[in-house]
Image (cartoon, rainbow, N blue to C red):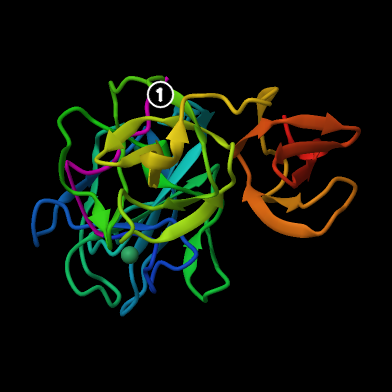
Amino acid sequence: MEKAYFPMKYYNLTQGYINSSTHQGTYALDNAGYDTGKDPIYAPFSCTVTKKYVKAGHAYTVWLTSNEKILTAKGTSDYLTLMIVHPEDIADLKIGQKFKQGDLVCHEGKTGNASGNHAHLELGIGTCAWHKNDYGIYMIDNAVKLEDYLFLKEDTIVKNDIYKGIKYSFKKENAMQDTDYVIKYTTTDLNERTGPGTNYSQINVLLKNTAVKVYEISGTWAKIEEGKWVSNNYLTTDKPSNHIKSMEVYNTDSLNVRSRENNGPIIGTIPTNTVVSVLQVLNDWTKIGPDKWVFNKYLK
Ligand SMILES: [Zn+2]
């Protein structure tokens, strides 16, 4: 099965989607390539041109849909569509035209109101077109994060992968799976931040006794997921004394935390995929911390 590749030789990020006004609500990445010129853009997988938007004064856009299911950097196999915005040389492309993986498709450009040559890239699952999102921005349907799904080829050169302090890093094609981690537990309610320092923005609060996977230590900070860091000073490898097992929040975007079982007052929420320590189970309710209870149904 083909792997889904990042479509350019140089990764030089000029805009991400967090704290970006023109990418609000999308997972778009702008790539300037090697320099200010018009770098080539290659087929990320064997694909067909499924849609094209070419209108004078507007940003030219082309959609490339995979001909088969493709192995993603996430480990899934999916049909994928890459949307490329701003090229100038797509007028002659035909709907139904096929490319083999690695074929030259077009070049970066600045059609529309782009300030310089770049490729605005978006990725979606399946055969998809676009729609206007809640911020009035056109974005690909079924959008997913490019950095989660595309591999960087071994010879792809990363010139920059940071925008406004946030890293958008891709997995190299031969990278090891992320199995190297240590399970630790929070010893207090702990701020989760986008980077290793208090100058990075806070994204969440992890409750005391939450189990986290630590992949990397930088100074006094621990990386628990790509773009998620907590202070290592408040982590311990010692399991909470009354720890029964670890479970994960699923099937809900955010799970209400209540001060007592049986629909007690809501005192906070925890996002999906968070791992919590089970301290006690009482009928339908699970105690995950001192005076902190959640409904069992959303734990697995
Ligand atoms: Zn853009």
Residue 79 vs residue 30: left or right? Answer: right
Q: Can residue 14 be seen in this view?
A: yes
Residue 85 vs residue 188: left or right? Answer: left
Residue 62 percent coordinates (x, y): 38, 56
What crowding class fits label 1: few (fewer than 14 Cα within 10 Å), some (14-19), or many (20 or more)? few
**Which residue is disc 1 drawn over?**
181
State whether residue 294 is above or below residue 67: below
Residue 297, by quadrant, is: top right
| Magenta run includes residue 130 | no
Front in this rendered view, residue 228 or 171: 228
The part of the chain drawn in magenta is 1-14
Judged from the image, the secondary structure of the residue bearing numbered disc 1 is loop
Residue 241, by quadrant, is: top right
Could you tell me which quadrant the C terminus lies in?
Answer: top right
Residue 67 percent coordinates (x, y): 46, 33
Q: Residue at x 37, y 61 (%)?
A: 61
Front in this rendered view, residue 76 or 235: 235
Q: Which residue is drawn at 16% across and 52% down?
A: 33
The kind of residue on which mark 1 rests is Tyr
Q: Is residue 97 visible?
A: no
Looking at the magenta stretch, what is its main secondary structure?
A: loop
